[in-house]
Each structure stands twice: as structure tokens, then as C-alpha cells.
Image (cartoon, helix red, strand yellow):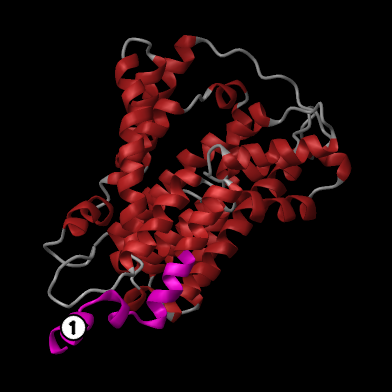
Amino acid sequence: MDFFVAFFKTTGLYLMTPGNVAMIVIGLIFISLAIIKHYEPLLLLPIGFGMIVGNIPYVAGMNLGVYDATSVMHYIYFGVSQGIFPPLIFLGIGAMTDFSTMLSNPKLILLGAAAQIGIFLTLMGALYLGFTPAEASSIGIIGGADGPTAIFLTSKLAPHLLGAVAIAAYSYMALVPVIQPPVMYLLTTKKERLIRMKPPRVVSQREKIFFPIIAFVVSALIVPGSLSLTGMLFFGNLLKESFVTERLAQTARTAMIDIVTILLGLTVGASTQAQTFLTKQSILIFVLGATSFAVATAGGILFAKFMNLFLKDKINPLIGAAGVSAVPDSARVAQLIGQKEDPHNHLLMHAMAPNVAGVVGSAIAAGFLWSFLVK
């Protein structure tokens, strides 16, 4: 009997705390949203299962979690904590991205830039609440709706907030279809939602090849801190558009990005151990992250309305919401909302322009903050 009692005291059942139970339930909710609602299943399912993995308690000294220096999970999590995985994901994103719609209508880049206002307003709010500049920058970047960028910047500036920031960023990316529509309806009229835009012009192959080279050089020279992210993004795009490295582009946008997403999602989820994750600070980060995302959405919409004051060919303000970096979900939301008003109004191709501009914009914003705060 003593043996069985001693064994029971080593089990997860005995060591489980209410916090662990709460986090496991949240992990199950994430998995349910991924499977039932199809909310970013490639992200939410690994993160949700990782939350369960990270909250199974074990005897001290066994070294099984992401924070235990010699554990397998720690070695995988190294790619997150040292900012290795995000640039690899950006390489895959670049190999999947078509910048044609943005190049055909360059003024739509401004919508992607305007949406970054959420980052800086939330940064100021976080400073007001007592966070340090480095912490506030890491929280503000959630407004870019770009999980890899949020992880990259937080790993450099505030690694102790990495778990909360990563979960908040990916959660709001997955909840784009829930968060954005109310803001879009609130800030637009029916007449504005019915605006039809002219088809984009055809972009030549030469433009597609020159763009990633020129865009990288310009952005890296102005904001060197963005070099890792924008460099991989534009390199991946050049692999795609050059037509001479299709095998490499195919690998980057399929096998490689899938492997990195699995490892990143699982270990980010596993980093949410209740003992370190369930804090007042984490709750504040989630609230500020939601605010940042909503403000970013509003910033893109309102700037589109402002541009319409001076444009002969009006912009449908719905595509301004796609200025956040949640590619391509926020562009799809703009399309869906627009087609509810007019089933024959196709906004997706136009919304992709600010959407991909937002990816670049959030990476540059992260590089700027890192450059400004680096010690």
C-alpha cells in the first residue's frame, strides 16, 4: 500500500492544480474551435494540444516542460524563444504571397500602413498601465495580427512575456471572423459597403521580380531591425516569382512552413503552464491585445474613408480592415461582408493589397521598435 501511495503522489492527478485544469479546458476549447468552427485550425489545434501538454503536472526534477533546460520540449521551444521560427515562417509566407494587387494599385499600401496605428496606440496604453517600454512594444505588436512577428519581437525585448503575447496574437488571428465584422459594420454605411472598385491592372513578370529586391533593400536600409523578417519574406517571394527556383519555393510554402508551424504551435501552447501563465499581467495583455486588434481594424477602415475624400475612384472602406496582417483571413472577411450587401461585388483581390502590405508593415514596425529599444 505504501508503494501505491508513493506512486499516486507522482501522478498528474495528484499534482494537478485548479490552474492546470483551467488551462487544459482552454486548450480543449481551442481544439474545438479549430475542428468545429474552422478558426485557423493549422494554428489553434497545435496550440490547443500544446496547452494540454504544458499543463500535465510532473514531479520536480523530471525536466519535461519547455522551461526545463534539458528537456526535449525546451530544445524545440528554443526556436521560439530565440526568434528562429518566425523568419522561417516568413520565408514560407513570401513563397505563397502574390504582391500583384498591391503593385497594381500602390495607394492601397497606405491602408496597410494605417492599420499599424493599433500597435502604437496600444503601446501607449500599455505604458500608461505601468509596463516598461520593451514590454509595451511587445504587447502593442499584437495589433498587427501577425503571430510570428509578435513572437520575434517579444523574444528580443520581453522574453518573459512570450507565452502570453504569442497566445494572444494567435488567438486574435484565429478570431478575425468574430472580431472584425462588428467594427466594420460600426464604421461603414450600407452605401460605402456597396462601392465597387475597378479591376486591378495586369502586373508584368519583371515588376514581380524587381519588387522583392527593391522593397527589401529600401526597408532594410531604413529599418535594419526588420532585416530578418522582411529579408526572409522577400527572399521567399523572389523564389516564387523568378520561376527558376520552383522546387525551393514549393518546399518553403509547403513542407517547411508546415513543419515549423507544428513545432511553433505545440511549444507555444506548452509554454502556458498555469504556474507561470495565469497572472494579472497575462490578463492585461489579452485585454490590450484585443483593443490593439480592434483599433488596427478601425484605423484601416477610417483611413480608407479619409482617402475617399480626395479620390475620384472610391475605395470600398471594408478593404481597410484587411490592413492587419492576418493573411488571408481578414481579406476574406472583407469579401464576405461585401457580398452580403452585394453578392456580385468581388473585393477579395482588392483586399489582398492592404493585407500583404500589412504583413510588411507589421514587420517594419517590429524592426523599428527593436531598433529603438535595443540596448
Quarter of the image where one finds residue 241: top left
Q: Quadrant of residue 155?
A: bottom left
Q: Badge 1: few (under 14), some or many (20 or more) residues near its Cα, within 10 Å? A: few
| Residue depicted at x 33% and y 79% | 16
Residue at position x 51%, y 68% in the image: 286
Q: Is residue 253 above or below residue 53?
A: above
- The magenta stretch is 1-26
Asked if residue 120 lies left or right of residue 261, the reply is: right
- Residue closer to the observer: 46 or 285: 46
**Residue at screen point 23% across, 65% down:** 65
Residue 41: x percent and y percent?
49, 46
Q: Position of residue 201 (x, y in %)?
A: 64, 15
Quick check: 286 left or right of 104?
left
Which residue sits furthest right? 191
Rendered view: 125 above or below 19: above
Where 122 sits versus 179, above or below? below
Q: Would residue 226 be seen by someone viewing this image from the given angle?
A: no
Residue 93 magenta: no
Q: Secondary structure at mark 1?
A: helix
Kindly identify which residue carries mark 1. Answer: 4
